Image: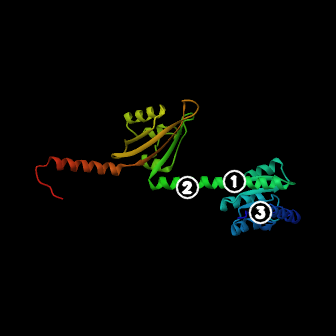
Amino acid sequence: MQTEVLVVEDERVVALDLRDSLEDMGYQVVDILARGEDAAAAAERLRPDLVLMDIHLAGQMTGTEAASQIRERLDIPVIFLTAYSDSATLERASGSLPHGYLVKPFDKRELDATLRMALTRHRAEVDVQRSERRLRLALEAARMGVWEWETATGEFESSEEVFDIIGRPRDHPGNGLQVLLERFKPKDRERVSANLMHGEAVSLTLELFGNGPRWVELSAKAFPRGGDRIGRVVGVMRDVTESQQTQAKLRQASAVFETTSEGIAI
């Protein structure tokens, strides 16, 4: 299947020459446009695999502005083709996060290599996005929150589900593992911290401080960074209060069944 390319170039001779070069290399040019305004609309209509975009175009919209719209709305990779490589132009171009930047004049091999690398990079990014989406949906389905702690900086990051489970501390600045551990009993807090700092995995059901008895299931693992030094700790947690309460009721019922002198039939 041919790779479809949208060409946005306001110099007609350059655009036609570019089309011929692309078709000689096996690409399919779906359209040639001269204005940034038209490029954004055509990209949405045609959904090409890639856009080759000049920066200085006819019309009100620059190539960098059109590229930003295409990336944000359609996630189609854009490669800039321009005769300008000054610092100001490069800075504006980098703001639109292009997948490549070619300075005119360029030869076919350079063009082909740039397109191939851009498409490969984009496919890898799409795969990562899909994996992240699957992981996020799996965590949501399991009602789990994920958190991460950098030991060197003390930086603590988490999904919103973590604070939905443990509550958001009011007086804590928000950095460090203490954000999480302070919600557990002191003996549990010390146990979790000691295990992680020794590189041991943790998988525990712990009781939270707070309004009424609540329990969470905590799983975490420390990852070394350079020798035996712990560099990062990653964990997940979920609220298991309901299952703990159910188990407690079952234990109570079992005790009643075992100790009663009356006959019981169900």
Amino acid type of the residue that numbered disc 2 sits on in the rendered structure: Arg
Residue 66 spot, x, y in % from top left? 74, 61
| Callout 3 secondary element | loop
> Is 222 placed above or below 46 here?
above
How far, Cα to Cα, is label 1 from label 3?
A: 15 Å
Amino acid type of the residue that numbered disc 3 sits on in the rendered structure: Tyr
How far, Cα to Cα, is label 2 from label 1?
A: 20 Å
Answer whether labels 2 and 1 touch (C-beta < 8 Å). no
Amino acid type of the residue that numbered disc 1 sits on in the rendered structure: Thr
Residue at point 72%, 54% (across, down): 118
Residue at point 36%, 45% (across, down): 215
Q: Which residue is mark 2?
A: 133
List the single residue furthest toward the bottom: 45
Pointer 2 or 3: first along the chain: 3
The one nearer the camera, 61 or 27, is: 27
User: Relative to 125, is 189 on the left or the right?
Assistant: left
Residue at point 71%, 68% (across, down): 46
Residue at point 78%, 53% (across, down): 113
Q: Which residue is mark 1?
A: 120
In the rendered image, which quarter contains the N terminus? bottom right
Residue 60 spot, x, y in % from top left? 79, 64
